[in-house]
Image (cartoon, rainbow, N blue to C red):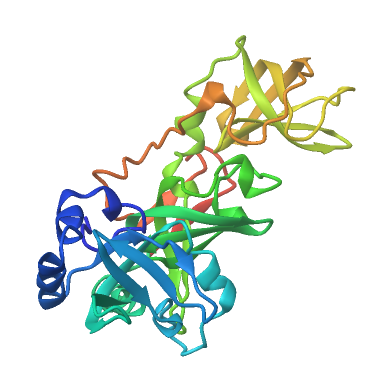
Amino acid sequence: MNNRYLPEGELIRDYENREYLSSFHALERAYEKRKILEAFALLSDGDFNLHFDLGGVAGIMPREEVVWSPTGEPVKDIAILTRVGKPVCFQIAGFRRGDDGEPVAVLSRRLAQEECHREYVSTLTQGDVIPAAITHLECFGAFADVGCGIVSLLSIDAISVSRISHPRVRFSPGDRVPVVVKNIDREGRIFVSQRELYGTWEENAALFSPGETVTGVVRSIESYGVFVELTPNLAGLAEPKEGVAVDRTVAVFIKSIIPEKMKVKLIIIDAGHETAEREPVWRRPPRYFTDPKSVFHIDRWRYSPAACPRVIETSFA
């Protein structure tokens, strides 16, 4: 498990990180050791330089040092402004004197990210299970920090087998989640997945029995029926019913579970009223059938039961 190149926000609570930010002499030691540290960005000045307080020592991060780009693209203003008020990782690039004669630490997030990519990200292979932190959400997916602020894309179809209308029903910015490396393209862009960690159809179906009435979330309404999510990787089909709406919680009776057809037949008992803006409280935290703390690589994952002729699987080889 990587302990040096963690998503931003992890080092800020670390004892060693606090020790290095306790004095000018401690910062000098961090500079000599090329330590990666974290501190909160206090403000962005008119020239888009970030400013920090490093235990009484001023720190400045020039705008060109805020983001490392593998393609050499210039730093966008928004990439700087969105760092203000958040933990930012950096290496100390050097020291200079301020206008008042006091020492100022010159910081570089770019150097930290460049090292993280060289020593960690570039060594990852498809199927590696790694920690990540959700940074922001779009309708097409979630962006996740996989180390030192280096961002990957978790597309909406890779979040779970159950289809969702928007990533916000699963995540909020700042959530710490495990992900599986799906692909790293030639430009260094990283794509990750999560659905392989939520278990197979059989593992999820084993949580339920015919005759039970349970709570689910409506994920889509079709002319022939209503798809109700029971877990992130298991949905069942219910007959059409008035009063239901997408992303609303409902009570459903489990009529039958059919592995060879990979189907769960449901009857909606109560249309419900609560809108599930995120995972409902009755189903959080999510259950990972593959323990991300002990499993660090997946070669192949088959979702569908062996008895089902329809094969849904992911091969990372």
Asked whether, in this view, residue 179 is left or right of residue 89, the answer is: right
Asked whether, in this view, residue 85 is left or right of residue 279, the answer is: left
Q: Position of residue 214 (x, y in %)?
A: 62, 15
Q: Is residue 20 above or below residue 301?
A: below
Q: Nearer the viewer, residue 300 or 31?
A: 31
Q: Is residue 260 above or below residue 104?
A: above
Quarter of the picture holding the C terminus: bottom left
Residue 124 seen anywhere in this rendered image of the structure: no
Picture quadrant of residue 53: bottom left
Q: Is residue 72 above or below residue 85?
A: below
Q: Position of residue 63 (x, y in %)?
A: 45, 81
Residue located 42% across and 76% down the image: 66
Q: Nearer the viewer, residue 288 or 299?
A: 288
Q: Position of residue 208 (x, y in %)?
A: 53, 19
Residue located 15% across and 62% down the image: 23
Residue 314 seen anywhere in this rendered image of the structure: yes
Q: Nearer the viewer, residue 261 or 288?
A: 288
- Most extreme residue toward the bottom is 72
Q: Is residue 90 above or below residue 65?
A: above
Picture quadrant of residue 260: top right
Picture quadrant of residue 102: bottom left
Residue located 53% across and 72% down the image: 79
- Most extreme residue toward the front is 100
Quarter of the picture holding the N terminus: bottom left
Q: Position of residue 172 (x, y in %)?
A: 55, 45
The image shows a total of numbered marks equal to 0
